[in-house]
Image: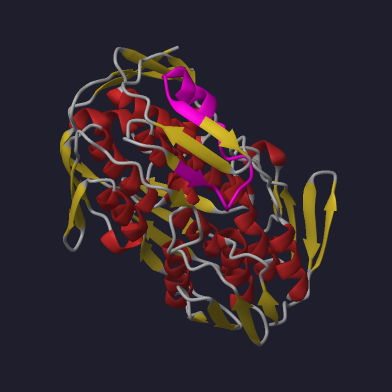
Amino acid sequence: MDKIVIKGGRKLKGSVRIGGAKNAVLPVMTACLLTRGVSVIRNVPNLADVMTMKAVLEGLGARISQRGRTIRVDTTSVEGHEAPYELVRTMRASAYVLGPLLASVGKARVSLPGGCAWGPRPVDLHIRAMHELGAKVEIDHGYIMATAGRLKGSTIRFSMPSVGATGNTMMAASRAKGKTVIANAAREPEITALADFLNRMGGKVRGAGTETIEIEGVDALSPAEVKVIPDRIEAGTYMIAGAITAGDIVVDNCVPEHVDAITRKLRQCGVTVETTRNRIHVKGSRKIQSVDVLTSPFPGFPTDMQAQYMALMTVARGVCVISETIFKDRFTHVPELRRLGADIKIEGNTAHVGYAGKLSGAPVMATDLRASAALVLAGLVAAGETHISRVYHIDRGYEAIEEKMSGLRADISRVPE
């Protein structure tokens, strides 16, 4: 097992290129199950979660080949319907196979998904949506068991705008008979990207990016090609890396509109952020000001950036209040940030972050994907060395983070633990 070692204190400088979005490529991969033939996906990031999804699809009978950043998904021989625990225990996105399997094979046996070590793993929205589309669904010994004839369109209103449930429903409804309306749908860019791919396959999805999505089911879909959108969470993480080190960096190959909420907060903190069509220029400040933040569904401040923003607030002047409204108990990074000298108090789903002055390097442990990124960011400004263990978490969502940070002049390396 590896660990990441950082010697803090360097201002970051240079340019970093953002890769394909983890949360966009995974549902696109599962959407290939809706058709038979070869689909081509470009700009695929080299991430542990992508490797896991490849194994899941291959277990169902798909043949997958990869050349560079492009993968070809051949679903001609897909006959399986089970996503077993040993494959999906580390990745909650595995639930994305539920809708496509029901629509194309008529049955699915999907292990209840795993993922990061925080908060609940509710699948009730997925299950209720499949039920509304005409499937019989039950939980049996840790597995979602579902069967269906041809699914039928329905009106489905989510109690909260879930990205996973919205994507699963869109895929299932694309092959259902009749029209499906998703009310209170997730509006994230990854949902719009999935809708674009479904439409390239011959689907009829309208309204993606709004609160109401309409899907007119079709009898069959055809293989298609797609390029994965840039990862907005990776982009936001490097933006904060520039800010926390008082650096001067360019975040390249991104979509600035996708990180508007992050840009607004950084500007309020005193950071200079300038955007062009596909670049973001970040110039940090030695005097970061505390600014409160409330996580909320897109276009609000993303929960997947909460830990990274907290790292920035540990060196900001004043007291910042961070309210987490999406997931319960998503503060497992707090004890580790405290080991670096952070002043953080927790009250329920609210964190009060005081000015810590200068952080000090220490051994810390990654508890989940985004917590890993927060510890890297804190380590960049901590005096001395920070050793981050259990970095397999970060490999799920950040491609070659030590190489990219080194390219920005950070003193960071990966070594055997």
Residue under the point 50% across and 32% down = 393
Residue 368, x across and y down, in percent: 53, 34
The C terminus, quarter of image: top left
19 versus 341 height, above or below: below
277 versus 207 height, above or below: above
Indicate how the structure is coloured in the image.
secondary structure
Picture mark count: 0
Residue under the point 64% across and 82% down = 180
Is 391 or 7 nearer to us in this picture? 7
Q: Is residue 5 magenta?
A: no
Residue 46, x across and y down, in percent: 38, 41
Q: Is residue 339 magenta?
A: yes
**176 left or right of 261 in image:** right
Is 180 or 361 nearer to us in this picture? 361
Which quadrant of the structure image shows residue 275? Answer: bottom left
Residue under the point 27% across and 34% down = 244
Question: Range of the magenta residues?
Answer: 321-344
Residue under the point 52% across and 58% down = 27
